[in-house]
């Protein structure tokens, strides 16, 4: 049974991943800055992190710590660097110095892509502070044996106070609020459930390299929103399609096409990733059971 350290265990993704890893037979130690976890430490502080991990031994370390608000990253590049880069640098340094047999799994983002997709792993386009700091974290992770997963995910949050895209969409339409959805931004996310399952397989196989982790196909975010709402019978009349250039709620520049070609990961792990429509149906079931 792999001995796993899960960093960022109380976040939107970590709250689901810990349970999935334990269910697969992993021995999991959780780490967070605050909240219920086995290790409580600010991972941006190298000295404190090394102290907290002194004498520990892990087969795999999974780093989920991230500042994912694109707007906040653009407004506070110093904070973006601190949260998105320093934990990756610090844990890579700890692995190299104190636990060299450990394998690092670094969760990255599809925001490192732009231009016409679907994108392979070879070429990146950095257009904002969020993508810059996430790419910098990838470089830190490459200093030790690591699997870097570029991904985007959707699904019902199980973390108190942490709202996902589909949470926002479900709650807004349930309250009959008028919302604007982006017609010209394309992506290929996976569900939280699929992402956790893939990471569990990565823990077993530990492939080294950078891999895209997305659903097959992809679509504009507006199409995703309408398809998700239709699956649940939510009122689509409250949604208005707009282009990102007219979206007043977007201040930072964003990629327009983040669709990914995930064939490299599929071949490495010997698995087939689902279509985005299949993922939408899977996520919709989570809200039907609410």
Image: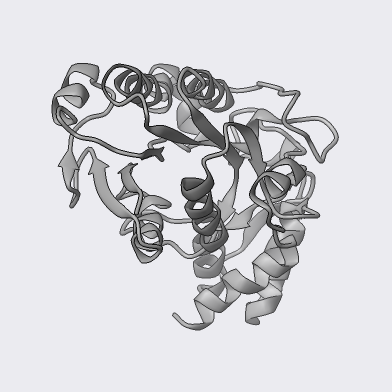
- Residue 271: x and y in percent read 68, 57
- Residue 18: x and y in percent read 34, 56
Horizontal side of 220 relative to 111 (left or right) equals right
Tell which of 68 and 74 is nearer to you.
68
Residue 127 placement: quadrant: top right
Q: Residue furthest right?
A: 116
Tell which of 123 and 155 is nearer to you.
123
- Residue 4: x and y in percent read 33, 45
| Rendered position, 45 above or below 37 | above
Horizontal side of 222 relative to 70 (left or right) equals right
Q: Residue at x 50, y 30 (%)?
A: 146
- The way the protein has been coloured in the rendering is one colour
Q: Residue at x 18, y 17 (%)?
A: 47
Q: Residue at x 42, y 19 (%)?
A: 81
Residue 158 placement: quadrant: bottom left
| Rendered position, 134 above or below 285 | above
Q: Quadrant of the N terminus?
A: bottom left
- Residue 97: x and y in percent read 29, 16
| Rendered position, 263 above or below 55 | below
Horizontal side of 231 relative to 86 (left or right) equals right
Instruction: Decide if residue 259 is in sight here.
Output: no
Q: Quadrant of the C terminus?
A: bottom left
Q: Residue at x 57, y 63 (%)?
A: 169
Instruction: Decide if residue 63 is in sight here.
Output: yes
Q: How many marks?
A: 0
Tell which of 76 and 145 is nearer to you.
145
Residue 249 placement: quadrant: top right
């Amino acid at each position: 049974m792999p001995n796993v350290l899960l960093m960022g265990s109380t976040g939107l993704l970590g709250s689901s991943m810990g349970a999935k890893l334990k269910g697969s037979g992993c021995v999991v130690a959780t780490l967070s800055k605050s909240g219920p976890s086995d290790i409580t430490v600010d991972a941006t502080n190298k000295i404190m992190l090394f102290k907290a991990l002194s004498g520990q031994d892990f087969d795999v370390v999974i780093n989920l710590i991230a500042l994912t608000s694109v707007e906040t990253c653009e407004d506070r590049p110093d904070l973006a660097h601190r949260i998105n880069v320093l934990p990756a640098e610090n844990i890579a340094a700890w692995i190299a110095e104190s636990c060299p047999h450990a394998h690092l799994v670094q969760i990255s983002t599809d925001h490192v892509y732009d231009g016409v997709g679907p994108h392979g792993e070879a070429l990146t386009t950095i257009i904002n502070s969020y993508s810059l700091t996430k790419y910098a974290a990838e470089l830190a992770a490459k200093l030790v044996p690591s699997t870097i997963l570029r991904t985007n995910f959707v699904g019902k949050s199980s973390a108190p106070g942490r709202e996902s895209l589909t949470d926002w969409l479900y709650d807004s339409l349930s309250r009959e609020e008028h919302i604007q959805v982006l017609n010209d931004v394309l992506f290929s996310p996976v569900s939280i459930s699929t992402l956790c399952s893939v990471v569990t397989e990565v823990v077993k196989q530990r492939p080294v390299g950078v891999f895209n982790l997305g659903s097959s196909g992809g679509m504009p975010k507006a199409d995703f929103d309408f398809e998700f709402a239709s699956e649940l019978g939510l009122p689509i009349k409250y949604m208005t399609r707009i282009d990102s250039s007219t979206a007043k709620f977007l201040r930072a520049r964003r990629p327009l096409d983040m669709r990914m070609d995930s064939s490299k990961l599929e071949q490495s792990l010997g698995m087939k990733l689902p279509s985005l429509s299949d993922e939408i149906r899977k996520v919709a079931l989570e809200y039907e059971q609410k």
